[in-house]
Image (tube, grey):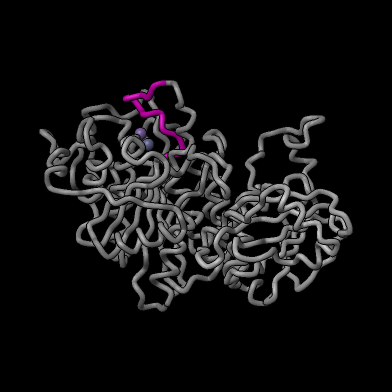
């Protein structure tokens, strides 16, 4: 659900009936103090509360004497000279959290002692938008509980007071495109599988046509013709037919090779015949987090008119046990011609991705391929939910991704690949098998994918620990986090739009 937040920018604003939020660095006093606090209540309040403007700390003054504002909240930024993009996002998120239930707020962002660029102001606003997000589609209004009653929720009007209004507005257009992409990805992950099957997901992707993205949707017949036996093997146990969606954004020069992003979109993963245990299986509605991130990214890039040619491909299937489901021991032929022995039908994501990767490489000859997938539980064992696993055959691509991870704070950790691991997926009966056994499970999954990318620079992001159920923070309180959208938007912007 779109954030019920209306943000505008101005040089000054009327404080009557509003909450005033004043940003402050550790080195100097709060922004906007003379406007919001003519009677000088701040000094005493700060002394009483021992407020030192540490990062994301707040000083809350209700009904301040002599002020037109109903409430003054001073929001600490910490040291002003080291503030990075993510610090501004966190500050914005914190501001949104203290404004819960409010209807009007005036935010003074130009904190003395900080270098407050237009981008910093936009990042602050982005943090507010991301924090305000709530997935409440299926909650009916309850009486006497404002929090749980979406229909009663009023729009929060926020005016951001800053010196360079025009520059802030311009930077905010980009931030809004990012917020929309992240929120789209979160919505897709949060939707239950009975509502969001492969066809419904494809229809959501089709909506990007409004932004100028070209969309093609392949059905079962077309995929059969292309020989996508690996992907189709996964979907054959479901009554819902698979879809492969190809999204193209042509914002670059015609001669520029496209950048390609590929997503795993298993709308629900029961494990198939190798069925999963019941506990926690409901989380497998989020096994399309990779496809959600790619779709959200395409939205953001198109909405902000990125100057790059970008392909997004998502493989949408449902993995179900059924009389027609594939069995352990089955051998399928992928589009590449390579044969795969299916040892475990729960290792299905790689079967979907291998055909999508091969198709992408074969048709588009991209600059690189980056795939995102909630691929293995093993990556959560290794990294928890604070880093996604990065596997790559290309050091330059890998370094650029790691850097974008640091900037966006959607962090990656590079994991190894190697011949010894590759051998672990050799099969007695086919060219390879779809699992390498218990150990190094996220690495052997990556080795599997690597067999389908040729010499194209490629990176695989295993986002099983970061796309869903990750701990909430200042800018995300949602189960589906939208991980990957900000990371890859930053990556494209920093490396391909100069
Ligand atoms: Mn699985
Ligand atoms: Zn899966």
Residue 495 is situated, as x and y percent measured from the top left of the image, at: 38, 70
Ligand 2 position by quadrant: top left
Is residue 259 or residue 337 the one in the foreground? Answer: 259
Disc tally is: 0
Quarter of the image with the C terminus in it: bottom left
- Residue drawn at point x = 42 percent, y = 47 percent: 290
Q: Is residue 329 above or below residue 359?
A: above
Q: Residue at x 73, y 37 (%)?
A: 147
Q: Is residue 298 left or right of residue 452?
A: right
Where is residue 146, by image quadrant? top right
Q: Position of residue 371 (x, y in %)?
A: 35, 53
Seen in the picture, residue 414 relative to 492 is either above or below; the reply is: above
**Residue 327 visible at all:** yes
Which residue is depicted at the point 30% across and 31% down? 345
Is 163 or 438 nearer to us in this picture?
Answer: 163
Using residue 176 as the reference point, say whether residue 416 is left or right of it. Answer: left
Q: Is residue 27 left or right of residue 216?
A: right
The stretch in magenta equals 264-277
Q: Nearer the viewer, residue 81 or 378?
A: 81
| Image quadrant where residue 479 sits | top right
**Frontmost residue, 497 versus 217:** 497
Magenta residue check for 172: no
Question: Taking 390 as reference, is 321 above or below it?
Answer: above
Residue extending furthest toward the top? 278
Q: Is residue 233 visible?
A: no
Membership of 266 in magenta stretch: yes
Place of residue 285 in the rendered image (x, y in percent of width and height, measured from the top left): 48, 35
Q: Percent x, y for residue 100?
A: 73, 45
């Amino acid at each position: 659900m779109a954030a019920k937040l209306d943000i505008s920018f101005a040089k000054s604003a009327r404080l009557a009936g509003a909450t005033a939020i004043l940003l402050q660095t550790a080195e100097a006093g709060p922004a906007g103090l003379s406007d919001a606090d003519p009677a000088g209540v701040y000094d005493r309040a700060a002394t009483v509360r021992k407020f030192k403007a540490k990062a994301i700390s707040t000083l809350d003054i209700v009904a301040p004497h002599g002020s037109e504002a109903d409430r003054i909240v001073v929001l600490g930024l910490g040291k002003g000279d080291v503030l990075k993009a993510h610090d501004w996002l966190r500050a914005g998120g914190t501001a949104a959290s203290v404004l819960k239930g409010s209807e009007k707020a005036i935010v003074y962002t130009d904190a003395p002692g900080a270098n407050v660029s237009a981008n910093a102001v936009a990042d602050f606003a982005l943090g507010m938008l991301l924090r305000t997000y709530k997935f409440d589609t299926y909650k009916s209004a309850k009486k006497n509980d404002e929090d749980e009653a979406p229909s009663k929720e009023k729009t929060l009007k926020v005016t951001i007071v800053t010196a360079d209004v025009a520059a802030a507005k311009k930077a905010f257009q980009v931030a809004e495109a990012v917020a929309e992409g992240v929120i789209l990805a979160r919505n897709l992950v949060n939707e239950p599988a009975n509502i969001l099957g492969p066809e419904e997901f494809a229809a959501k992707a089709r909506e990007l046509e409004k932004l100028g993205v070209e969309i093609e949707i392949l059905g079962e017949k077309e995929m059969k013709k292309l020989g996508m036996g690996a992907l189709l093997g996964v979907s054959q146990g479901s009554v819902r037919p698979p879809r492969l969606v190809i999204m193209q954004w042509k914002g670059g020069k015609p001669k520029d090779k496209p950048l390609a992003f590929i997503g795993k979109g298993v709308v629900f993963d029961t494990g198939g015949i190798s069925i999963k245990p019941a506990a926690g299986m409901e989380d497998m509605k989020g096994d399309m987090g990779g496809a959600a991130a790619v779709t959200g990214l395409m939205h953001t890039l198109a909405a902000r008119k990125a100057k790059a040619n970008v392909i997004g491909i998502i493989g949408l299937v449902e993995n179900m046990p059924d009389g027609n489901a594939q069995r352990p021991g089955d051998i399928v032929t992928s589009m590449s011609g390579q044969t795969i022995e299916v040892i475990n039908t729960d290792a299905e994501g790689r079967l979907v991705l291998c055909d999508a990767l091969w198709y992408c490489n074969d048709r588009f000859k991209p600059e690189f391929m980056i795939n995102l997938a909630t691929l293995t539980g093993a990556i959560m064992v290794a990294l928890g939910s604070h880093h996604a696993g990065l596997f790559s055959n290309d050091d330059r691509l890998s370094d650029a991704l790691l850097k974008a991870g640091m900037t966006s704070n959607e962090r990656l950790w590079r994991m190894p690949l190697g011949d010894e691991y590759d051998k672990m997926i050799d099969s007695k009966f086919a060219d390879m098998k779809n699992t390498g056994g218990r150990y190094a499970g996220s690495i052997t999954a990556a080795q599997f994918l690597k067999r389908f990318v040729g010499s194209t620079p490629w990176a695989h992001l295993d986002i099983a620990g970061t796309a869903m159920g990750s701990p909430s923070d200042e800018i995300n309180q949602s189960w589906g986090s939208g991980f990957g959208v900000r990371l890859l938007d930053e990556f494209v912007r920093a490396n391909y739009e100069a």
